[in-house]
Image (cartoon, helix red, strand yellow):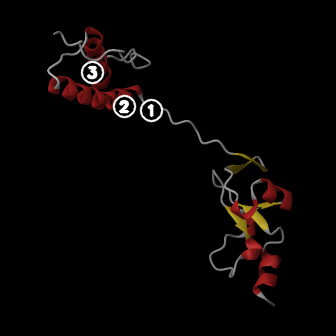
Amino acid sequence: MSILDDLKAAYPARYYADMGKPCAWYDMWSCASMDGLPAASTLFAMTAEQWTAKGGNTGTKSMAVENGALVDYAPPVVVVPLKTQAKTAQAWIQQQANLTAAMGEVFTADMKAYVKAIAAIAGGTDTTSTALPVLPTDVMEAATA
């Protein structure tokens, strides 16, 4: 028997997806060896139509096996905690403070209020806000002649 005969016996469907999210793809009959291949019983057998629909050997479509069916995969939305968002905003504020100082300017009243609100969220004293405050339109006071 040849390796192809062994592969066909072990993997009769030829095309498979694993149970990962997103799943990995296998064209088992194209393998040069059976070493390291997962057992067919741990995989989802695909039809040739499903293989073609996902883009064949070069397809990069993200899919997953759910409830015994191959479906499009959408990664879960990662929710960034508000306190983390505020700490990230503080880095931007520091850049603006450096630019403002270098130019001999000062923050606008709106920017000062923004800085205080961000600091309260980042520091944990504001525990009721559910979103960052709106970024001020003007950061620096206009220079006077």
Residue 29 located left or right of residue 60: right
- Which numbered disc flags the more N-terminal residue, 3 or 2? 2
Label 2, secondary structure: give it: helix
Give the residue type at disc 2: Thr
Residue in view at x 30 percent, y 29 percent: 92
Point out residue 98 in the picture as x, y percentages from the top left corner: 19, 29
Residue 108 located left or right of residue 44: left
Which of the numbered marks, if any, corresponds to residue 130? none
Residue in view at x 79 percent, y 59 percent: 51
**Quadrant of the image for the N terminus?**
bottom right
Give the residue type at disc 1: Val
Q: Is residue 134 above or below residue 9?
A: above
Q: Residues within 10 Å of mark 1 (few under 14, many from 20)?
A: few
Which of the numbered marks, if any, corresponds to residue 119? 3
Mark 2 = which residue?
84
Residue 56 located left or right of residue 126: right
